[in-house]
Each structure stands twice: as C-alpha cells, then as structure tokens.
Amino acid sequence: MGFEQSSFEHDKRKVILSEEVFARLQGLINATAFNKQLTDGSRIKNGYEYGGVLYGTLDEEGNINFTVANDKADYQVIDGAFSLQSGKEMMKELLMNIKNSKFNCFAHVHTHPYSVEANRFLSDADVEYYKTTFDFSGVESSLEKKVNTFGCLLTQSSSNEPQSDDVSFVYFNKEDGKMYYLPNNFVKSRSTGTLYPLKKVREKLYRRNEDGRLFNEKQYRQQSGTFGVREVERTLLDTDEFEK
C-alpha cells in the first residue's frame, strides 16, 4: 500500500523554493492532471507521471534552498512512469551539476495522478528508488563535497482542485537507516526575499479492515464495512499569501 509521508521521521528544517522552482512544480502537477483526462484507461490505468530534478544548496542554518530546476520541462515518460531513465539529456545534466560547485542539494521530483487515495503516498518502489538509485554518496570523496539527495512527490488532489494538490519532500538517512519527511516548505519572493509558507493541513484517513483500501473523509461516508481511522499531515502546493 506504500508509505504515508507524515509517518516518517520529521525533519523541521525549511525547504525553500525559488519562484522558478515553485512554478515548475505547479506546471508538473497541472500536466499530470490534464493528461489524465486524455489517457486511455485500458492502456495506462492511472495516467501519466511527470518529473524532473531540482538543484540547490544548504544555507548556514542547514535549510535546503532549491533555486533552479532542470532545463527541459517536458521530458517524455516511459509506459506512464517517470524516472531519471526517462531521458538521457536529464541524466547528463544531473551528472554535470553534481560536479558543479554551486550545488550540493539535488531532488528527484515525480508526480502521481489521483486514482485512489493510496496514490497520494510514496510507493514501495519510490522509497527504494530514493534509498538506492538516487544516491550519489559514492562520488563525494572525488568531488570533495557532501551530495545531499532528496525525493519530491507531487500528488494530484482527489477533488482535482489545484489548491489541494500535495507536495512531499523526503530523504533517506544512511546513518540511522530511516526515511525523513520535510513538511516545512516555503516560496521565496524574487523581489523582496520574503518567505511565504505553503499550507499545511491535517485530515482523517480511513482504512477499511476488510481489504485495506484507503478513503478520505468524503469517500468514507459512501462506503460500507469496518474502518480504522488516523490523522495525517499534508503540505499543499499552494499559498494564499504569495505575491502573484
């Protein structure tokens, strides 16, 4: 069933997005929502995933600042799924920027189209990808710098309302063998440097005991069976304060 992000260990550091990066994330989830409507359900059941890479640095307080996204915004996906293997150009660009002294933080971004509530979570394959494939610690000694890697999942909302889409930044800590979730996300104004927080919400999720399926509160009211309930935390890809 995958992993609900807020069940991971919490890292209270800030993830600070430039306006450019914020716009790219919004564009990726919009493309996912749009193309789901065009997808032949018999061919690709849950729609297309999109993605890319973010580049940035740690500041003096240890906060993660993502300042730029990969050059090309429209990489083709393969069989509906997105990974770095989706484009040789993107992998070439990433390897070049890992060597770039300007960057020491890298985030692999991908989207999930909404089909069932579980799609809003990281899959087993996602977590394994962040633990193993998206790991460049082996080149740190030759580069003489720490390479910090992160995962970023963008999830279309169940209601298909942009202000309710999710963003989740996570990473795997090799030292303690645990996954961490970074819920404190901000957008930095280009003109003033002001930080605008992305919205955080808590909501109830219901797991049906008979089959393990997950439902949000609205969907739960339409179901039958016996259920377990828990509260989860989400960070939304939206801020009502950010200057437009």
Image (cartoon, rainbow, N blue to C red):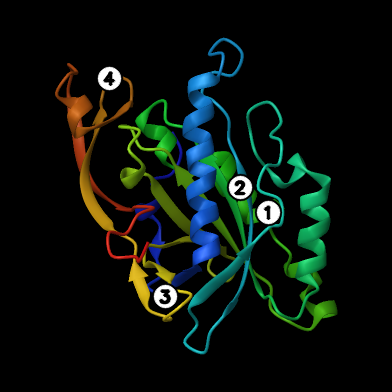
* Sequence-first tag of 1 and 4: 1
Of badges 3 and 2, the one in the foreground is 3
Can residue 152 be seen? no
Structural distance between the alpha carbons of marks 3 and 2: 23 Å
* Sequence-first tag of 2 and 4: 2
Of badges 2 and 4, the one in the foreground is 2
Q: Could you say which quadrant of the image residue 135 lies in?
A: bottom right
Q: Give the crowd class for mark 4: few <14, some 14-19, many >=20 residues within 10 Å.
A: few
Above or below, 50 against 218 in this view is below
Horizontal and vertical percent position of residue 136: 74, 64
Which residue is located at x 77 percent, y 51 percent? Answer: 90
Structural distance between the alpha carbons of marks 1 and 2: 6 Å
Query: To which residue does mark 3 refer?
Result: 13
Query: To which residue does mark 4 refer?
Result: 210
Above or below, 49 against 234 in this view is above
Going by the picture, which residue comes out furthest to the top?
A: 42
Horizontal and vertical percent position of residue 181: 43, 60
Going by the picture, which residue comes out furthest to the left?
A: 221
Structural distance between the alpha carbons of marks 3 and 1: 23 Å
- Looking at the picture, which amino acid does disc 3 mark? Arg
Query: To which residue does mark 2 refer?
Result: 128
- Looking at the picture, which amino acid does disc 1 mark? Thr
Q: Is residue 74 left or right of residue 48?
A: right
Q: Give the crowd class for mark 2: few <14, some 14-19, many >=20 residues within 10 Å.
A: few
| Mark 3 touches mark 2? (CB < 8 Å) | no
Query: To which residue does mark 1 refer?
Result: 132
Q: Secondary structure at mark 3?
A: loop
Q: Secondary structure at mark 2?
A: helix
